[in-house]
Structure formats: structure tokens, C-alpha cells
Amino acid sequence: EAQVTQNPRYLITVTGKKLTVTCSQNMNHEYMSWYRQDPGLGLRQIYYSMNVEVTDKGDVPEGYKVSRKEKRNFPLILESPSPNQTSLYFCASSLWGAGEQYFGPGTRLTVT
Amino acid sequence: KQEVTQIPAALSVPEGENLVLNCSFTDSAIYNLQWFRQDPGKGLTSLLLIQSSQREQTSGRLNASLDKSSGRSTLYIAASQPGDSATYLCAVLSEKLVFGKGTKLTVNP
């Protein structure tokens, strides 16, 4: 089944404790991206990756890192999480940047 | 800078009604436009993708149209059902992906 998977689905952590949210797709997509969704602000892009060699900042990259070592995986790293990073996070992939977007199920992160 | 607006922000209708959700965008240089459904606290389910060369796409009771020149897309839902209650998002796919903030639809039995 073609899909985008994210892990964990739910995470509660404390300020400053490094964490990684994994994202994997099995559709051989070149383009992958991360979003956060907050009430009243909608979906905002954190980082995107055009392919394994090209990764760039989205609209709200501060406090986040990403890594694209292989085509199928695009982990999101929070080196020192803070409470303002409490949000619902989505990973997405597509064949190319403006192609049909496929979203993962989301990760609800709470930072206390 | 591309801006995507969805009006109204919320809509409540009785079951069985046909309805139209609107999505407008400021830059007509787009590749695709995609409509999604999102249930509370859940992920995004893709409903329809309209390519820039297309005028409309249909899937079951859903019909999406695209008018690039006027910067508008509409999502038509026929014979609405309580199960259609959700937030509907449009995403403009161009050099940058831009999402609207959605229309929250409630279909009352």
C-alpha cells in the first residue's frame, strides 16, 4: 500500500530534550516536506527537500533540523524543544514539488 | 507572494443540501490545486487534484472546478451527509505550496 508513515504518533516531552520524528514514504517520491498545524494559523511549512541532494527552509524553520540521507526517509529533529513547538506535525511527499501531495497521519507533540 | 483564502471559515447546512466551498488565490501561475478533507485532530485526506490545464475534476458526489484566470477554485458537494462534516482545505501547488486555512463544514441531520 502506498503510504507515508510517521513515528511516533503522539509524543509528550520536556523542554530541552532532543527528539526525532521519523517520516518514511514507499512511493519513490523525490519531494518530501514537513508542516506544523496550529489553530488559527493553518498549515505552515517547516522544511522541504526537492530530492536527496537539495533541502531548504520553509516558512517556519527556526528550532528544527532535517536530514535527507536517502530518498524514502526525511526525519524532523528538534535539538532543544520548547513549549512553543507544541503542535500537530505532518510529513508529506510527492513525485515532484508541485505534484499531488500525500500526507502522513500526523504526530501530536506536546512540550512541557 | 501567493496567498490562498477560503471563505467562509465555517458553514452549517442541513442534510441533503448541495453546497459550494470557495478557494481563491492571488497568483495564477500554478501547476496544480488540491482539495483535502481533515477530521478534527486527524490527518489530511486528499479529495481531488486539478491540474492547471484542467477545468474540473469529479469524484462521486464531489466536483472541483478551477478558473486560473480569476484565481478561483470551488468544491461542490452534492446531497450533503452528516459524514461530510469536516474541515476542507485547498492547497495551491506552484513554486511554493500554499494552503488555505480551511472551511469547517457541519452537516446537520
Image (cartoon, coloured by chain):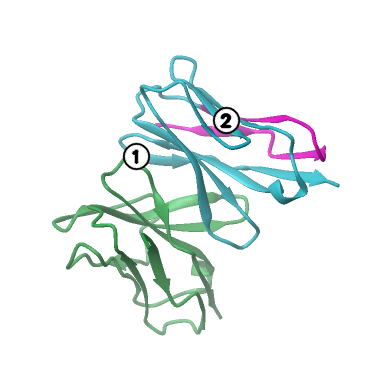
Chain colours: A green, B cyan
* Residue linked to disc 2: B63
Q: Is residue A47 above or below residue B11?
A: below
The x, y position of residue B2, in whole percent, is: 42, 32
Predominant secondary structure in magenta? strand
Q: Is residue A55 above or below residue B5?
A: below
**Mark 1 — residue?**
B96
Q: Nearer the viewer, residue A8 or A82?
A: A8
Q: Amino acid at mark 2?
A: Asn
Residue at horizontal 75%, vertical 44%? B81
Query: SS for tag 2?
Result: strand
Residue count near mark 2 (Cα–Cα under 10 Å), binned few <14, some 14–19, many ≥20: some
Observer-nearest of A84 and A77: A77
Q: x%, y% of residue B24?
A: 54, 27
- Which residue is drawn at the image coordinates 34% and 76% (left, top)? A79
Indicate whether B55 appears above or below A5. Answer: above
Q: Is residue B39 magenta?
A: no
Who comes first in sequence, dot 1 or dot 2? Answer: 2
**Where's residue A3, x and y in %?**
38, 61
Q: Is residue B14 left or right of residue A103?
A: right
Q: Are marks 1 and 2 in contact (CB under 8 Å)?
A: no
Query: Is residue B91 visible in the rendered structure shown here?
Result: yes
Badge 1: chain ID:
B
Q: Residue furthest top?
A: B69
Which stretch appears magenta?
B1-24
Quarter the N terminus of chain B occupies: top left
* Residue A68 placement (x, y as % from top left): 21, 64
